Image: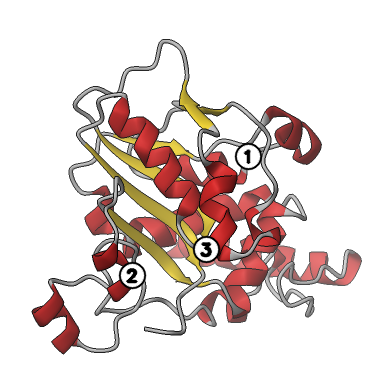
Amino acid sequence: MKARASHISIVVSLADALLSIVLAPVCAACETSLDEPTRGPVCRACWQGIRHFTPPLCDVCGDPLPSWRSVSIDCGTCPRCRRRSHDLTRSRAIGDYDGPLRDIVHALKYDRRQSLARPLAALLARDGASILSGADIAVPVPLHRSRKRARGFNQAAEIARYLPIPSAHVLRRVRPTVSQTDLPAAKRHANVRHAFAVRRGRDVTGLVVVLVDDVSTTGATLESCARVLKAAGAREVRALTAARVASRSR
């Protein structure tokens, strides 16, 4: 067994060396030369450079909290989440939408590096284990058909299908919306209001649903989806996103 593993390691190393010479591939995130192209389009340094969110985190939106003291006093929620009612019960992300994680998400989303969905899902499964525990189904946030046609795939669906629970296209986007990144925070909830509906023939009655998306900014899109799912009978709606724009004002 050890001899076989050693043989495989040698073959992989030779393949990496050959590909590096012939194709001269660069990292899809930082654009430096890839020393190990057989491991995927992103270099080891970028994966290791991701700044993961660590506790304490807001139990509702997943934002970092300033200290454990705020958890014990405020029941683990940030000031903004305490001021609002939520259809979304809990959320988690790998880390802040910045640095290597932002570059990796961009490579998946805009450069069509769909192979990055699997390792992102693996990180989500680890960092979001509490969200997946006891959940019945993963539901990707849908793209409008015009945007999906232009992009060629739904990055949220690609991530969702590699999570360790079943995934299904339960939601549909009933009208096109302006990209949330192009809008101020105050207008994002209005932009996605009434933008989603449950697909015909899909039943989520009594299920614990995990919404999946690539990035959460204000959480408006996730809340809009959660509202529709709860109205359709879902028992609980949670969320996992590869990255989150963390508030700087907490």
User: Looking at the figure, which quarter contains the N terminus?
Assistant: bottom left
Mark 3: secondary structure? loop
Q: Is residue 98 left or right of residue 111?
A: left
Q: Is residue 129 left or right of residue 166?
A: left
The x, y position of residue 178, in whole percent, is: 70, 47
The x, y position of residue 44, in whole percent, is: 59, 76
Under mark 1, the amino acid is: Asn
Up/down of 35 relative to 178, above or below: below
One can see residue 40 in this view: no
Residue that badge 2 annotates: 80
Up/down of 206 relative to 36, above or below: above
Residue that badge 1 annotates: 154
Q: Residue at x 71, y 60 (%)?
A: 182
Disc 3 and disc 1 in contact, CB within 8 angstroms: no
Q: CA distance from mark 1 to mark 2?
A: 30 Å
Under mark 3, the amino acid is: Thr
As drawn, the label of residue 217 is: 3
Q: CA distance from mark 2 to mark 3?
A: 13 Å
Q: Nearer the viewer, residue 44 or 30?
A: 30
Q: Residue at x 68, y 53 (%)?
A: 109
Closer to the chain start, of discs 2 and 3, is 2
Q: Nearer the viewer, mark 1 or mark 2?
A: 2
User: Looking at the figure, which quarter contains the C terminus?
Assistant: bottom left
* Structure colour scheme: secondary structure
Disc 2 and disc 3 in contact, CB within 8 angstroms: no
All told, the count of numbered labels is: 3
| Disc 3 residue crowd, few under 14, some 14–19, many 20+, Cα 10 Å | some
